[in-house]
């Protein structure tokens, strides 16, 4: 049962084949059995999950109508505040903090009857592409435990690939949903900026952060998307418009007559051979399914990474200022006579990891008077140029596509001391965040040279998220008929797993 | 030896710059729904947003935007079609996020002015104070430093933090530099703050209570030699908690600067703290090296782009400017200057106007509010508007006196009864039996009794000694418990005793 898709689990519960409590227990057992190796979870809320499952079972027993994902378990990235549940954002500085409130996404999940199993591992404050920056140790890629599961949301994607959960929530600032999805052979969507509330999402870079759905199939992702999306009065940047009809698009899965633009600059040099070949094959399948493939050029994407590493650190230097030991989290050096300033300094020294400090320093510098225009100001201009590139490209294509990442999963430790090489992993995902549009990654096969999953990225204009689901579902169907079984059926069994 | 004020102005020209912070009286905070009521138990008016909890986000209070636009319009400012919030980054324990959301380079209102008048030996003088900007921001929490000498963070044993104030909407009104006030600088500063306070009150956007901190003034003062073009170094005096203090602080700083400059020393650019007892300032935070607040546009908020039609709707609701209104009422009511000033000082203008609007004679209405009612308010240590007597009550009482249904003496008892909570004037008159005795046969009977009791006095009157009538009138008034109209009693008495009654 745990290897099925979420919508299949839901059907099984509706038909009485299984109860939510049984389904939840099966996933809790799986976590117990494999998570020592994968380390996808930072906290498992056994009691809360079973209680929620029981209440869904009770509602069903009373004959009440429940939502399409009611009773289905989910893994929540530890960056989302959940009332009373330890929430750390992968940082030592928040160790022991239990939020007094629910993020809007969490409220919506609870209202939909989704069962939250626990909180998943991540790079500290979502800064990283490997989960190696977690203060609580790395997560391992279920395809190869010596490799990274992507990041920052490596815990969420690994939990899906390891069948510890059929659904997960991620957040994506520069690729933190899509890159982990790509390297674990799962599906992840960064919705249009403002499509899902950020209230309760511990901010890394406010103008780029976006929560989104993760699952093993395009339809499951769409079902979760509809549960968490929509306007929220608590988030001033949330869009007040109807949620795009993503479930309908995923069910129809049609690309007939659609123009699919291949972004010239997000392919070629620097992209692994197996990544390129799988990507090319996917384009052929889409063409066969009735899409027209065109090439588009986005010349300013070249500057996206550099601009991103000014904007995101600038915003984070300010967003992370609140972690000062005064109101929550750990407190260091609070001895007789210590000043508030000294306690703040020592707490931040001990509480933040190296990558976080690196970005705070970068951002503090970029925002300093005298440097602001040259750094932050220029980066914002680049951002405008990137939006213009997208706008132009979307006049000749309905969606844009590229490989999600230049490579498959790299080895744990391989890039840990080379931040620039690590940053380059997000080169194809960052432009989407800079423009505030939607992006999806779905698996398109294994690279022949290393047998590891390759991700296919679909990008759609703002609030046209349904287009990604149309393309994703069409490609998924074509690939499935080619493979005969989902890609994850090829994942090696985890040692010790039942 | 210290300089006199005359020495200072003989040599130097003061230049002012005034920054006024106003706490808006919105029901909820700038970026969350928490209550803004003053004086709550510490940390009871807080939520994840104003405590800066991880993940919490701000949402702009639309009422605060409306209030800011009203202020800008009343100060003759342009309302910018597009303004933004920025983050002002600095670490301080009473600031939950360690940045303050404030408007920086794109404020909501710019380029206005406020004309103020001061009364001088040379007559009324008018000054125009130009306004640079009006912008919105959130207030910080409050720190209470315990132990140590001065209540400052340095040297304190520990500090307590109250975040009830964190996130209260503030509007900051910043003037351009104000040159050309000469020796009147202190009075102009005071008059500006007073006029601003009256405008804000008339707009109904703030409680403008300086003593509670809902209106706070920072006074920037610098001196330059008369005729010089270059501005001198300024000091910024904070903690000025009354109108009188504004004037004293400016005057004190002018003298302090002049003493330094005369000695060949330089003025340090710094904040100064005004001390109410001494009228002097003490050194605060140095501003010699501009702090780098790393301002950048607040990414959690969208720009403020007020609709032009909305602005015009708000413009149409602007009340009459307080100065103009005062002049109009003074002439309509024919009030002498001194009494007008007394009425303004007593904050009685609104309430008198309301009473007049209900039909009362202006002089009578003013007389009641500033006389008997003010006296009772003083006794109780409250303001006249706190008492349980309304303009409607006073207007009724004035009417009853005019109709002869009440004497002034009886009316005072009615006022007392209404304030004591005994009900409307009519019900106080009823329950206390205060109606004027107008039954003339009853009055005549009382007069007869008075004459019978004091036959010698009556005889004197008959013989033309009119002043003796007082004793008999007094006796009648006593018998009627003051409820008779004394003038009528006099008439009846004199006629009865064969004397002319007028």
Image (tube, coloured by chain):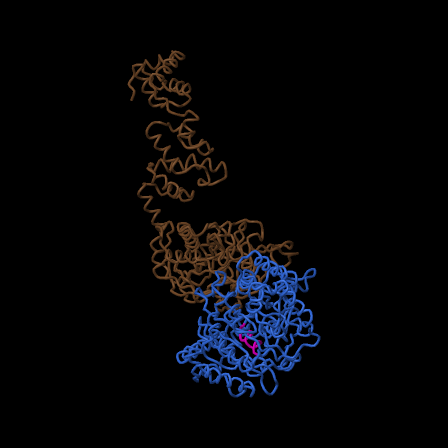
Chain colours: A blue, B brown
Residue A80 appears in the figure: yes
Number of marks in picture: 0
Residue B354 placement (x, y as % from top left): 37, 41
Q: In which quarter of the image is residue B433?
A: top left
In the image, A202 versus B482, the foreground residue is: A202
Residue B171 placement (x, y as % from top left): 45, 58
In the image, B181 versus B324, the foreground residue is: B324
Image point 50% across, 37% down: which residue? B380
In the image, A399 versus B301, the foreground residue is: A399
Residue A230 placement (x, y as % from top left): 48, 64
Image height check: is A54 above or below A311? Answer: above
Quadrant in which the C terminus of chain A appears: bottom right
Image point 34% across, 56% down: which residue? B313
Image height check: is A477 above or below B382? Answer: below
Q: In which quarter of the image is residue B444?
A: top left
In this rendering, would B488 be left or right of A73? left
Residue A413 placement (x, y as % from top left): 65, 80
Image height check: is B369 above or below A436? Answer: above
Q: Give the range drawn in magenta.
A: A172-182
In this rendering, would B208 be left or right of A446? left
- The answer to whether residue B145 is magenta is no
Quadrant in which the N terminus of chain A appears: bottom right
Residue B54 appears in the figure: no
- The answer to whether residue A177 is magenta is yes
In this rendering, would B67 be left or right of A219? left
């Amino acid at each position: 049962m745990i290897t099925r898709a979420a919508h299949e689990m839901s059907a099984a519960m509706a038909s009485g084949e299984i109860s939510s409590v049984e389904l939840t227990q099966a996933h809790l057992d799986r976590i117990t059995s494999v998570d020592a190796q994968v380390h996808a979870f930072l906290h498992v809320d056994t009691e809360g999950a079973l209680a929620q499952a029981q209440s869904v079972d009770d509602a069903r027993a009373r004959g009440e109508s429940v939502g399409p994902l009611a009773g289905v378990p989910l893994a929540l990235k530890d960056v989302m505040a959940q009332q009373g549940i330890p929430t750390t954002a992968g940082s030592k500085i928040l160790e022991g903090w239990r939020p007094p409130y629910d993020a809007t996404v969490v409220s919506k999940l609870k209202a939909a009857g989704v069962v939250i199993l626990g909180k998943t591992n991540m790079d500290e404050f979502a800064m990283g592409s490997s989960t190696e920056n977690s203060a609580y140790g790395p997560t391992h890629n279920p395809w190869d435990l010596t490799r990274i599961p992507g990041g920052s949301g490596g815990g969420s994607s690994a939990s899906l690939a390891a069948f510890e959960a059929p659904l997960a929530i991620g957040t994506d600032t520069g690729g933190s949903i899509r890159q982990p999805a790509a390297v674990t052979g799962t599906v992840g969507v960064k919705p249009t900026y403002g499509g899902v509330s950020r209230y309760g999402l511990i901010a890394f870079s406010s103008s780029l952060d976006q929560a989104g759905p993760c699952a093993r199939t395009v339809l499951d992702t769409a079902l979760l998307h509809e549960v968490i999306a929509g306007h929220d009065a608590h988030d001033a940047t949330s869009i007040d418009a109807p949620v795009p009809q993503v479930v309908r698009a995923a069910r129809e899965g049609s690309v007939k007559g659609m123009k699919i633009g291949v972004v010239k600059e997000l392919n070629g040099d620097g992209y692994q051979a197996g990544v390129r070949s799988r990507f090319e094959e996917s384009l052929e399948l889409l063409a066969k399914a009735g899409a027209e493939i065109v090439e588009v050029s986005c010349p300013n994407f070249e500057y996206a990474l550099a601009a991103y590493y000014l904007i995101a650190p600038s915003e984070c230097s300010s967003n992370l200022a609140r972690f000062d030991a005064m109101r929550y989290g750990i407190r260091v050096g609070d001895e007789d006579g210590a000043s508030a300033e000294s306690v703040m300094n020592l707490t931040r020294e001990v509480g933040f990891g190296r990558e976080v400090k690196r970005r705070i320093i970068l951002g503090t510098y970029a925002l300093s008077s005298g440097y602001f225009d040259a750094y932050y100001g220029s980066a914002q201009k680049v951002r405008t140029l990137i939006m213009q590139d997208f706008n132009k490209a979307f006049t000749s294509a309905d969606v844009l596509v590229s490989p999600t990442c230049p490579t498959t999963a790299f080895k744990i430790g391989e890039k840990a001391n080379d931040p620039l090489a690590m940053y380059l992993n997000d080169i194809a995902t960052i432009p989407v965040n800079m423009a505030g549009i939607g992006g999806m990654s779905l698996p398109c096969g294994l690279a022949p040279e290393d047998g590891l999953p390759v991700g296919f990225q679909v990008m759609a204009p703002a609030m046209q998220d349904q287009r990604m689901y149309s393309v994703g579902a069409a490609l998924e169907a074509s690939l499935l008929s080619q493979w005969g079984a989902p890609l994850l059926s090829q994942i090696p069994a985890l040692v010790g797993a039942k | 030896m210290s300089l006199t004020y005359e020495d200072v102005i003989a040599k130097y020209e003061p230049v002012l710059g005034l920054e006024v912070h106003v706490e808006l009286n919105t029901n909820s905070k700038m970026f969350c729904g928490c209550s803004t009521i003053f004086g709550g138990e510490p940390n009871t008016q807080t939520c994840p947003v104003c405590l800066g909890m991880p993940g919490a986000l701000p949402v702009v209070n639309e009422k605060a935007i409306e209030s800011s636009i009203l202020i800008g319009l009343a100060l003759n400012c342009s309302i910018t079609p597009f303004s933004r919030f920025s983050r002002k980054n600095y670490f301080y324990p009473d600031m939950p996020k360690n940045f303050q959301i404030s408007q920086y380079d794109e404020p909501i209102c710019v380029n206005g002015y406020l004309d103020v008048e001061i009364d001088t030996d040379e007559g009324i003088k008018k000054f125009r104070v130009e306004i640079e900007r009006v912008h919105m921001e959130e207030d910080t929490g409050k720190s209470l430093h315990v132990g140590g000498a001065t209540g400052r963070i340095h040297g304190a044993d520990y500090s307590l933090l109250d975040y009830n104030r964190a996130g209260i909407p503030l509007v900051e009104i910043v003037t351009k530099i104000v040159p050309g006030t000469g020796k009147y600088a202190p009075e102009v500063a005071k008059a500006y703050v007073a006029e601003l306070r009256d405008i804000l009150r008339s707009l109904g956007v703030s409680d403008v209570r300086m003593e509670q901190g809902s209106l706070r003034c920072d006074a920037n003062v610098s001196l330059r030699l008369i005729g010089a073009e270059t501005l001198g170094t300024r000091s910024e005096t904070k903690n000025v908690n009354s109108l009188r203090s504004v004037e004293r602080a400016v005057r004190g700083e002018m003298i302090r600067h002049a003493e330094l400059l005369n000695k060949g020393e330089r003025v340090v650019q710094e904040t100064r703290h005004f001390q109410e007892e001494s009228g002097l300032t003490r050194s605060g935070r140095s501003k010699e090296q501009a702090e780098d607040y790393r301002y950048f546009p607040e990414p959690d908020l969208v720009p403020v782009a007020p609709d032009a039609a909305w602005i015009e709707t708000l413009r149409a609701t602007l009340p009459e400017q307080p100065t103009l209104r005062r002049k109009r009422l003074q002439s309509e009511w024919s009030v002498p200057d001194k009494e007008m000033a007394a009425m303004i000082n007593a904050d009685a203008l609104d309430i008198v106007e309301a009473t007049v609007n209900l039909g009362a004679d202006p002089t009578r209405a003013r007389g009641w509010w500033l006389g008997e009612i003010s006296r009772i308010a003083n006794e109780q240590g409250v303001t006249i508007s706190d008492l349980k007597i309304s303009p409607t009550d006073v207007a009724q009482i004035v009417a009853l006196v005019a109709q002869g249904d009440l004497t002034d003496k009886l009316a005072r008892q009615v006022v007392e009864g209404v304030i004591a909570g005994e009900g409307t004037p009519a019900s106080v008159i009823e329950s206390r039996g205060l109606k004027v005795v107008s039954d003339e046969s009853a009055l005549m009977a009382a007069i007869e009794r008075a004459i019978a009791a004091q036959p010698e006095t009556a005889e004197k009157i008959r013989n033309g000694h009119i002043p003796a009538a007082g004793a008999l009138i007094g006796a009648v008034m006593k018998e009627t418990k003051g409820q008779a109209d004394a003038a009528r009693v006099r008439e009846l008495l004199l006629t009865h005793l064969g004397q002319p009654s007028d």
